[in-house]
């Protein structure tokens, strides 16, 4: 198939380039409005009990969770008569705005103490912006433009969850642009050093830009028919840039190698596609499968990144297999134009005694750094495997102390309005009321005695300050206030709900809040209840991740085993590759905890706030992306080793020669993609910074310690058994295997020196 594709691309190169360019332009135009279709939410399980509680609260009571907070500051104090009048008028005016409900404030609730700051100069206005995530985020942006700032002697600042979502979306758009601005020029310089030619260096970048714009266009279509999270844009931008450069590096390097061996440009393209093209195909499938495994999770933010990762991988691979060969066909020998410096060709040495087998006779083996490294490692495999494995496990040790949570305003930069309001509320207000849990009983409000008895039981739970419902207020197992007009909103027909106020709402007490959710749900109720609220949403989201994690892992592992068998023809190598890829991730997850949970080296990666926990979505999403990338480099290496093994019949020679032939280019690819991923660290969102640290670590660990030490040592210990497969599976591989084999030799051009091996 790739051979036919090569012939088609060479014949129709101009048409391919024109169509590719037009599609890229269309995708680029669509990307200008992409962020209008994205949402910053998606960190909840829509089928969970907490989500059903929120729906019931809206349907039966016409109330939503408070998602809008206005911080009002006055130098004269919030109890000054003029400030009271201005604050009351502001509250009423905001309450009359369309799309805004349940607005109350310090001045309209009888000067409730929990809505007054400790200093007496700050007060809160609370409300709910109605509608779905997209509508509410646009609405809060319009309201902020009209109300934020100085008005009638008051300083007004917007905050709350909807404002946080809006700023997360805007910051993501800004970060995507900044990341491209930082990554592209640095990557171009790195590529010039790698290839030594300006033309050759420009090709991977051109293909990457085409792939990114195509993926942005498809993401725009996807966002038009379903909900897509804003973090997907960062994945498309930087992962697309990195993968397309990765694949193009491999293809361009193989093409230049085939040209040096004496092939004409059309034959060199054919040889490149039928060899390196197979590896690119497999690698793109590897990353796509790892990303799509995230579709098991019901959290839309995780799914969105999975969809984006899969689209990016497939289109990056397709661009490298179609657009890049068309460019190569157009350039031909001119790929070496713009030569900046000439790299000395590696010396060759005669084949050593390890290169046995009928095809090995007369072959020459490139004897360079990677060949010598592999030979050294294979002389002492046991101590090297032991030392490197222990080192990687040591780097991963901090992961044992991970504390999982869910993201809040602290993931935003200090300049964020939502972040500033949230920090002020935590520092100066009793925020327990704002973080109350809602217990909804859709069919239970008719029996007031049962309602009161259940509220009394809830108020006896540890860490509960008060319970409010249609029958009054309760504290410490006793009725603290009789029912009156203030509590009428808790009942609607046969439905009733309870507001359970925790003793503390500090972010450091997340474990207590999570425990309280479980205690409420285990408390016997006389009717069916649904527990909602921020703590319940976080609890259910973490439970969903834990529930679906085995399915996602199983999908990745099973698919990888099948694909790795197809590329290697071995029973043992797929399992070995999976183990080594997992080992390469230990440093990534250790750094995740050490830096972003514990706060070490925080200033090195841009100022952010360590929260003492890690958002539960980060390890899942980071695994999906990093595991696929870690497999990428092992695929590059194992594909070439398979080719060498079929030529030499020697497992040790296959390792040494395969590592030597892929060593420089895989190292270059790892450096290039790491430079791209490091651009994530310029993000103002700590969630995104985590990818900027974790992904380069995974790539570099796999491309150095795993590839240079552990894999050669493990294959030396396995010997010929490494490549063994039962007869039935060998026949299956012979028929369906993804072989990394060059095209049939073509006549050499006059004047070109043929390179053996």
Image: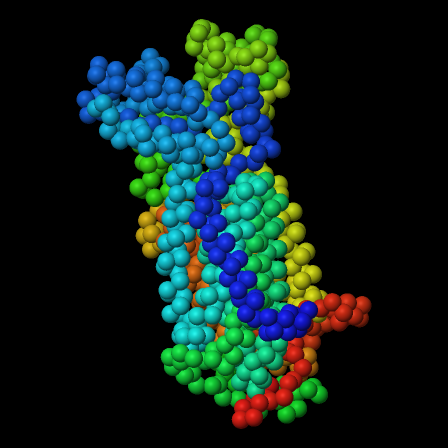
Q: Image point 66% across, 73% down: which residue?
A: 3
Q: Residue 333 at x, y = what percent?
A: 50, 81
73 relative to 102 in the view: left or right: left
Instruction: Give the answer, above or below, for where 571 lies relative to 462.
Output: below
Q: Which of the 4 quarters of the picture holds residue 647? A: bottom right
Q: Residue 501 at x, y = what percent?
A: 45, 22
222 relative to 602 in the view: left or right: right
User: Closest to the observer: 510 or 644?
Assistant: 644
Furthest-right residue in view?
A: 728
On the rendered image, what quadrant is the C terminus found in?
bottom right
Instruction: Give the answer, above or below, for where 26 lies relative to 521.
Output: below
Structure colour scheme:
rainbow
On the rendered image, what quadrant is the N terminus found in?
bottom right
Q: Image point 39% across, 43% down: which residue?
A: 170
Q: Image point 66% across, 52% down: which residue?
A: 555
User: Closest to the observer: 16 or 196?
Assistant: 16
Instruction: Give the answer, above or below, for where 439 lies relative to 506.
Output: above
Furthest-left residue in view?
A: 76
Q: Image point 41% across, 47% down: which residue?
A: 173
User: Closest to the observer: 328 or 579?
Assistant: 328
Asked whether residue 743 is in view, the answer is yes
Q: Residue 216 at x, y = what percent?
A: 50, 52
282 relative to 165 in the view: left or right: right
Asked whether residue 353 is in view, the answer is no
């Amino acid at each position: 198939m790739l051979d036919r594709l090569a012939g088609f691309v060479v014949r129709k190169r101009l048409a391919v380039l024109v169509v590719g360019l037009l599609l890229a332009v269309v995708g680029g135009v669509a990307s200008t409005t992409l962020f209008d279709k994205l949402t910053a939410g998606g960190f909840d399980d829509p089928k969970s009990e907490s989500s059903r509680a929120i729906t019931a609260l809206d349907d039966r009571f016409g109330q939503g969770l408070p998602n809008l907070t206005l911080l009002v500051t006055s130098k004269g104090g919030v109890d000054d008569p003029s400030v009271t009048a201005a604050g009351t008028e502001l509250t009423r005016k905001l309450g009359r705005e369309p799309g805004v409900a349940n607005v109350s404030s310090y001045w309209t609730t009888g000067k409730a103490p929990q809505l007054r700051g400790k200093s007496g100069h700050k007060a809160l206005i609370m409300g709910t912006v109605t509608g779905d995530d997209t509508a509410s985020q646009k609405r809060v942006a319009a309201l902020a433009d009209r109300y934020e700032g100085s008005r009638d002697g008051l300083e007004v600042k917007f905050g709350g969850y909807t404002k946080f979502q809006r700023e997360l979306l805007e910051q993501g758009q800004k970060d995507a642009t900044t990341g491209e601005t930082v990554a592209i020029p640095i990557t171009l310089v790195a590529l010039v050093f790698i290839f030594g030619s300006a033309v050759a260096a420009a090709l991977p970048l051109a293909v990457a830009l085409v792939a990114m714009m195509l993926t942005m266009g498809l993401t725009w279509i996807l966002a038009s028919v379903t909900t897509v999270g804003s973090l997907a844009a960062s994945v498309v931008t930087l992962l697309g840039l990195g993968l397309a450069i990765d694949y193009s590096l491999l293809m361009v390097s193989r093409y230049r190698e085939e040209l040096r061996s004496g092939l004409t440009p059309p034959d060199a393209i054919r040889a490149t596609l039928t060899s390196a093209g197979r590896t690119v195909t497999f690698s793109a499938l590897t990353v796509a499968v790892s990303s799509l495994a995230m579709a098991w999770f019901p959290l839309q933010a995780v799914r969105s990144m999975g969809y984006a990762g899969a689209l990016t991988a497939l289109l990056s691979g397709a661009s490298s297999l179609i657009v890049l060969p068309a460019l190569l066909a157009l350039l031909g020998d001119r790929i070496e134009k713009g030569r900046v410096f000439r790299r000395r060709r590696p010396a060759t040495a005669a084949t050593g005694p390890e290169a046995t087998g009928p095809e090995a006779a007369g072959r020459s083996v490139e004897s360079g750094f990677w060949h010598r490294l592999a030979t050294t490692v294979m002389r002492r495999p046991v101590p090297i495997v032991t030392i490197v494995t222990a080192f990687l496990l040591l780097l991963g040790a901090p992961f044992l102390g991970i504390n999982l949570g869910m993201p809040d305003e602290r993931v935003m930069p200090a300049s964020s309005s939502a972040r500033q309001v949230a920090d002020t509320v935590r520092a100066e207000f009793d925020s327990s009321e704002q973080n109350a849990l809602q217990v909804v009983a859709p069919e239970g409000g008719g029996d007031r005695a049962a309602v009161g008895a259940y509220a009394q039981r809830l108020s006896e739970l540890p860490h509960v300050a008060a319970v409010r419902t249609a029958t009054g207020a309760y504290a410490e197992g006793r009725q603290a206030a009789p029912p009156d007009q203030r509590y009428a909103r808790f009942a609607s027909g046969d439905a009733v709900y309870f507001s359970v106020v925790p003793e503390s709402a500090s972010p450091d007490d997340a474990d207590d809040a999570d425990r309280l959710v479980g205690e409420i749900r285990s408390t016997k109720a006389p009717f069916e209840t649904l527990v909602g609220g921020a703590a319940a949403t976080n609890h259910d989201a973490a439970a969903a991740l834990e529930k679906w994690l085995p399915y996602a892992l199983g999908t990745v592992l099973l698919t990888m085993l099948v694909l790795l068998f197809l590329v290697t023809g071995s029973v043992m190598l797929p399992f070995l590759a999976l183990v080594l890829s997992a080992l390469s991730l230990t440093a990534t997850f250790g750094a995740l905890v050490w830096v972003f949970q514990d706060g070490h080296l925080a200033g090195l990666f841009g100022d952010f706030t360590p929260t003492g926990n890690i958002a539960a979505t980060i390890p899942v999403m980071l695994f999906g992306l990093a595991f696929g990338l870690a497999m990428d480099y092992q695929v590059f290496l194992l594909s070439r080793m398979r080719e060498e093994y079929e030529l030499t019949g020697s497992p040790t020679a296959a390792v040494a020669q395969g590592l030597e032939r892929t060593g420089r280019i895989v190292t270059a690819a790892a450096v290039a993609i790491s430079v791209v991923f490091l651009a994530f660290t310029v993000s103002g969102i700590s969630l995104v910074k985590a990818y900027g640290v974790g992904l380069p670590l995974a790539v570099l660990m796999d491309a150095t310690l795993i590839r240079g030490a552990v894999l050669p040592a493990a294959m030396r210990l396995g010997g010929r058994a490494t490549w063994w497969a039962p007869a039935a599976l060998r026949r299956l591989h012979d028929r369906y295997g993804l072989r990394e084999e060059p095209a049939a030799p073509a006549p050499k051009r006059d004047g070109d020196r043929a390179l053996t091996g």
